[in-house]
Image (spheres, grey):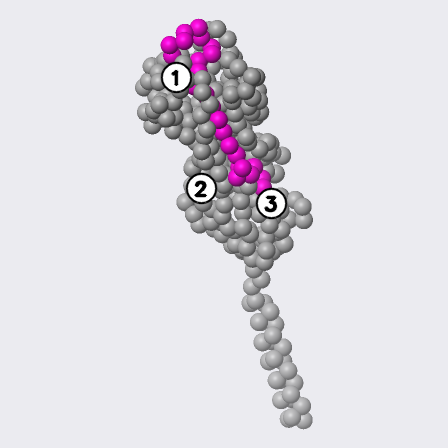
């Protein structure tokens, strides 16, 4: 009888121990997502970056950020973290609410698929591949009748053939992006206008505050700086020695500075001849990249 009681007592104690162990066991409901990106710059005040996990084909936000100091770590639901197949980074309007806040905007800047616990992300596949980009331009001021200030305008065209052709070889951009030309004067970039097509006038062709009164110029991106002033420079001026840049810009965009992606750039030679084709070189940054780990 005593042996039976001892066995019963031992069973009771063992049962209580297991029950207590089960009660105290904590099952993780969240996990960490660490984002480490290179090349990003701060956005205009009305926009933020937002990370997304693609889970069973649907986007799940990992949070927004404005600081471009990395790495950064975010707390995410463990199930979403473990089953996500892709990470996407987008540019979103600050304070966005409603249905628009539940999915990434068209302006997606980085993406990559997970392989195990990490994903390599890049802008190449989601914004554009600029590895084969090229550019040409001429100095000319076709929007006024004055032929003494031809070095005060830049047009992205090739006039070495009978009929001028496009001077830019650039890929078609994904939705949410546009190209923009710039002239750097006194260290300050001044826009030549945004554009989507290399063989058509840019978006401000008819409204530029700097152009002359004769017309809007040829049907290619470019700008005449013949009236007004910018960056402390009165127009007309001489663009020799200035830096010409083509950037890739979020659209919409409220920043007055070029975005971080700049696939083409060139310093106008001091001996550049007006109306003659000048070739551009590679810009300072054509690809954004990074890694995401879970």
Image quarter of the N terminus = bottom right
In the depicted structure, whether residue 19 falls above or below residue 76: below
**Residue matched to label 3:** 60
Mark number, residue 39: 2
Q: If you read the primary sequence from the N terminus, does the residue marked by circle 3 or circle 1 appear first?
A: 3
**Boundaries of the magenta span:** 125-149
The residue drawn where x is 52% and y is 39% is 131
In this picture, residue 59 sits left or right of residue 224: right
In the depicted structure, whether residue 261 falls above or below residue 292: above
134 inside magenta stretch: yes
Tell me the mark number nearer the camera, choosing from 1 and 2. 1
- Distance of label 1 from label 2 (alpha carbons): 33 Å
**Mark 3: which secondary structure?**
strand
Image quadrant assignment for residue 115: bottom right
**Residue matched to label 1:** 151
Mark 2 residue crowding within 10 angstroms, few (<14) / some (14–19) / many (20+) = few
């Amino acid at each position: 009888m005593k042996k039976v009681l001892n066995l019963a007592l031992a069973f009771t104690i063992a049962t209580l121990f297991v029950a207590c162990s089960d009660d105290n066991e904590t099952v993780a409901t969240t996990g960490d997502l660490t984002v480490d990106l290179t090349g990003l710059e701060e956005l205009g005040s009305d926009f933020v970056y937002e990370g997304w996990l693609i889970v069973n084909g649907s986007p799940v936000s990992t949070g927004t950020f404005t600081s471009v100091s990395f790495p950064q770590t975010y707390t995410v639901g463990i199930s979403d973290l473990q089953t996500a197949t892709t990470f996407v980074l987008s540019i979103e309007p600050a304070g966005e609410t409603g249905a628009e806040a539940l999915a990434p905007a068209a302006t997606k800047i980085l993406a990559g698929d997970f392989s195990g616990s990490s994903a390599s992300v890049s802008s190449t596949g989601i914004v554009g591949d600029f590895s084969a980009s090229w550019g040409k331009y001429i100095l000319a001021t076709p929007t006024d009748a004055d032929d003494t200030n031809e070095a005060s305008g830049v047009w992205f065209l090739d006039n070495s053939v009978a009929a001028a052709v496009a001077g830019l070889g650039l890929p078609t951009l994904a939705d949410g992006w546009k190209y923009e030309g710039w002239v750097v004067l006194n260290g300050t970039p001044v826009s030549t206008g945004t554009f989507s097509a290399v063989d058509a006038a840019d978006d401000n062709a008819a409204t530029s505050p700097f152009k002359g009164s004769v017309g809007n110029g040829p049907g290619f991106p470019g700008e005449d700086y013949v009236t007004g002033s910018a960056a402390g420079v009165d127009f007309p001026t001489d663009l020799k020695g200035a830096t010409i840049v083509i950037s890739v810009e979020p659209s919409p965009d409220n920043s007055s500075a070029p975005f971080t992606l700049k696939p083409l750039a060139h310093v106008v030679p001091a001996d550049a001849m007006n109306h003659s084709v000048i070739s551009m070189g590679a810009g300072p940054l054509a690809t954004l990249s990074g890694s995401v780990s879970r």
